[in-house]
Amino acid sequence: MVREAKLALEDGTLLKGEGFGFETVKSGEVVFATGMTGYVEALTDPSYKGQILMLTYPLQGNYGISSKWYQSDSIKAEGLIVREQCRRPSHHLAEKTLSDFLEEYEIPGISGVDTRALTIKIRKRGTMKGALATEEIDDDELIKLAMEQPDIRELDLVDKVSVKEPKILHEEYNDRIAIIDCGVKNNIIKAFLEREVSVALLPYNTSPDVILEYEPDAILVSNGPGDPTRVKEAIETVKRLSEKLPIFGICLGQQIIALAFNAKIYKMKFGHRGANQPVKNLETGEVAITSQNHGFAINPKSIDEKDLKITHINLNDGTVEGIQHRELPIMSVQYHPEAGPGPHDTYNTFDKFVKIMREY
Ligand SMILES: NC(=O)CC[C@H](N)C(=O)O
């Protein structure tokens, strides 16, 4: 049975397609990601909370869904837009179809959309608010919903995805990292455990004194959804602990570290989301192909040269991809070294973090 689905954008655009997944109406910021694979990891990445994800590669769902690839316990994106969804996936680990997966977590999907045309529109106009309906709703009402929802900068999304209670993993390991969980991906936790580093997973608003009670050897400020300037508690924590412990940041974590050192953040026109963003390490000259998912970035001119230096840049647009403190053991990256999904070029970033932590 073909179900009609509709996607409305804040500029009044209305697109019709076929619905799959759950029958509902959801709104969010419509963003596009260009990776050819990785839909399971992307949908479950907490950084996509508040966003409707559009995948530009035209055929999605081919290898089905395995819980082994989840980056959190459920789908965090608000909706999914594809050109075509595969109904008969083939993979030895596949447990269900893409549509069943969306259904299970009550997320709507729309197929039959000219995702490449829509991507061109977003690249020209910038990211837009949208609303996706897989159940019946009046066209004008859906457009109104797209227009009238709050901007992503007005939402406290980290609070929705951070752990509620602290959790310690592999207490027996000698070294420990405290992760300030703003919506951390499973692969990041795994990367530390693989290096025999115990993880104390802490709510994003844990006070610095309580963090120290876990006796960490270093702190990681994780990736996460939304506008970093709203995560005031974590910014304050970095300020308070910057002279006490090594601090690492990934994506939202990098933005939070930058804010703690008084740099400024801006919202990019359409962000970086995909698996082939070229990043140059300014110290070694090496170029890596990286996985990314962010809509905000550090304004390089706002960086106080006395404190921070830029260590990595994006070769497509020159944006800041890595920073480091000039004296303190504080460093961060805007890209996703944990590669979930995406290329493993920068997986060694974790070796660098752990080395600094062990030598400190
Ligand atoms: N993956 C992330 O951590 C994203 C960071 C932030 N929410 C942004 O969009 O820029």
Image (tube, helix red, strand yellow):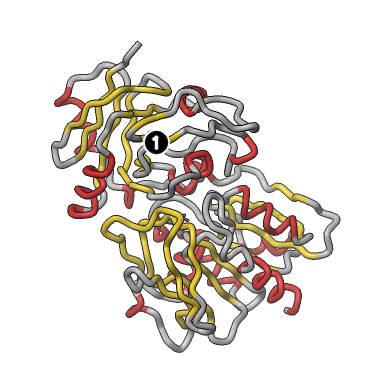
Residue at x 46%, y 55% (from the top left corner):
275
The percent position of residue 285, horizontal first and vertical second, equals 49, 82
Q: Tell me if 353 is positioned left or right of 308 in this view.
A: right
Which residue is label 1 attached to?
Answer: 59
Q: Residue furthest front?
A: 90
Q: Quadrant of the C terminus?
A: bottom right
The percent position of residue 322, horizontal first and vertical second, equals 48, 73
Depth check, front residue: 254 or 206? 254
* Callout 1: SS: strand
The percent position of residue 80, horizontal first and vertical second, equals 38, 34
Q: Residue furthest top?
A: 1
In this rendering, the answer to whether 196 lies above or below 70 is below
Q: Tell me if 25 is positioned left or right of 179 in this view.
A: left
Residue at x 66%, y 53% (from the top left corner):
189
The percent position of residue 122, horizontal first and vertical second, equals 23, 49
Q: Quadrant of residue 59?
A: top left
Residue at x 68%, y 48% (from the top left corner):
166
